[in-house]
Amino acid sequence: MKGKYDIMLPKGNSCPSKVDIILIQPNIVSPYKIVNLPYGPLFLASSLRRAGYRVLIFDDRLDDRKDLVKALRENRILFVGFTIFTGPIILDAIELSRFIKQASPDTKIVWGGPHPDILPEQTVINPNIDIVCRGEGEITSVELADALKDSRDISSVKGLTFKRNGKPVHTEDRPIIRDWDKEVSMALDLINLKRYIFDSGGLKTIHIITSKGCPFRCSFCWNLLCTKRIYRAWGPKKIEREIQPLVKAGVKRIVIDDAFMGPEKRIVKIGELFKDLGLVWAIEDGFRVDVHKTDSLFQSLKDTECHHVAFGAESGSQRILDLIHKDITLEQILDSARLSTEYGIGAKYSWMVGIPGETKADAIKTVRLIDAINKINPKIAHAVSLFAPYPGSELFNRVVQMGWKSPQRLEDWGRFREEMEYNYLDNMWFYKAIMYSNFLLHGSDSEYILWKQTKSIYSLFMRIFRPTAAARWKHRFFSFPFEYIFAEKVRGALKERIEK
């Protein structure tokens, strides 16, 4: 039956007949089978296509590189763009940039995203990268394409870093995009949505982003530098237009991945929109215990069939919360657990250990607070991560002052998080043991985690190490975690095989 949301969905991401620009989502090893939408390429593609350019979105997690080579060889490609975050994704992006240069030596390689935005000179000196897009790329990418199409000097384009005579050159900074409703969209019709939709509880489910930035001042976050604490968001009418292809594709659950969900009244309106469209929903990130805390909000979440919400709690030590400028209290964290439980809304909490200045006693306070929350509701999920000093954050500068040697090459940032040593920690493996034990006990099997399709190799490790994780957690014994050291070494050895 023809309806409000009828559109033509592509059968795949195979190469179209004519292409001007290629936007790439690099690959990254994940323990889960679920593949999220390539947000960066989708946002940029919408702006470029609106300016008249023909765009191919290539997802290296799913697509065949033969299609990429075909597009490069059969078209005059103005540039190939990558969206890059700090961490392992860098390694695949470097390898793929090299692959493209070999297939088409004259093609311009452009890197954008938080990592090259913060470290543009260190990024652009890599021989496989020609240009770095600093700041937001929706307008910059169009102006860059215009200049390359007309063979004009790109130095007039704001927000670029490029090489001239082998040395980095910066153009004027690009002002931040204020009107997100008008300037930013997702070109969902350029991809095969079926590959990003997964089943959860019998419902076709997909993740989306509806805002950008965060107005808060957490000292561990790169958002302060990249978005200047400026928050922009789609309104309900814009969200309705953007999710039309998802509704047409049969999606019944929307999971929102925003860094910050905005004021309560915005959340209530989003829930009402989803209810009117017959959708259930969940909030995977972006709730704050000091902002999203009223009975009326949680009653609305219940009325609109919100499956769960996710809070950033970070630490069970008030001293550490104050140190990282989280601007919340331990009692607010506990109140959020009580409130979500009272209204039957699932909840998730994210935590960090190994924060510079944190002691083992502080980390144990986090363990205790997790247990206190689980006494309120044992079904609540928890994700504990080892703090990583992201470049551009206040805590990054602090650990450098403490003597930590940050990576000096782009390739080394690709081994960030998983393989680096942090000499400012008294015992890094003590904190890693907390992280792994929590994952096995409070994260991997929770009904509030929507991506249960874990890859088999990871499931095997979960079954093997869960009993020891329970013992460690119960007795607060996180020293000498030989089993986790062994598992991490095995994971590293099998990394290429898992990725395939």
Image (tube, rainbow, N blue to C red):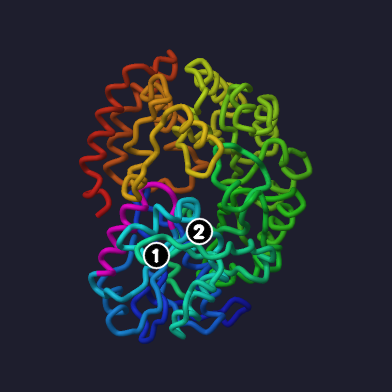
Q: Nearer the viewer, residue 199 or 317?
A: 317
Amino acid bearing label 2: Ile
Image quarter where the N terminus lies is bottom right
Q: Is residue 43 above or below residue 52?
A: above
Badge 2 density bin: few <14, some 14–19, many ≥20, Cα 10 Å: many
The magenta stretch is 84-101
- In space, the residues marked 1 and 2 are separated at their CA atoms by 39 Å
**At numbered mark 1, what does the secondary structure look like: helix, strand or loop?**
strand
Could you tell whether 493 is left or right of 248 in the image? left
Q: Is residue 425 above or below residue 85?
A: above
Which dot marks residue 206? 2
Q: Is residue 460 above or below residue 161?
A: above
Could you tell whether 182 is left or right of 243 in the image? right
Q: Position of residue 257 (x, y in %)?
A: 56, 52
Which dot marks residue 163? 1
Badge 1 density bin: few <14, some 14–19, many ≥20, Cα 10 Å: some
**At numbered mark 2, what does the secondary structure look like: helix, strand or loop?**
strand
Q: Position of residue 260 (x, y in %)?
A: 64, 48
State the residue at coordinates (38%, 71%): 80
Give the total number of marks visible in the rendering.
2
Could you tell whether 395 is left or right of 408 in the image? right
Instruction: Determine the residue located farthest toward the top in the rendered image.
Output: 475
Q: Position of residue 67 (x, y in %)?
A: 29, 75
Q: Position of residue 422 (x, y in %)?
A: 39, 29
State whether residue 454 appears in this view: no
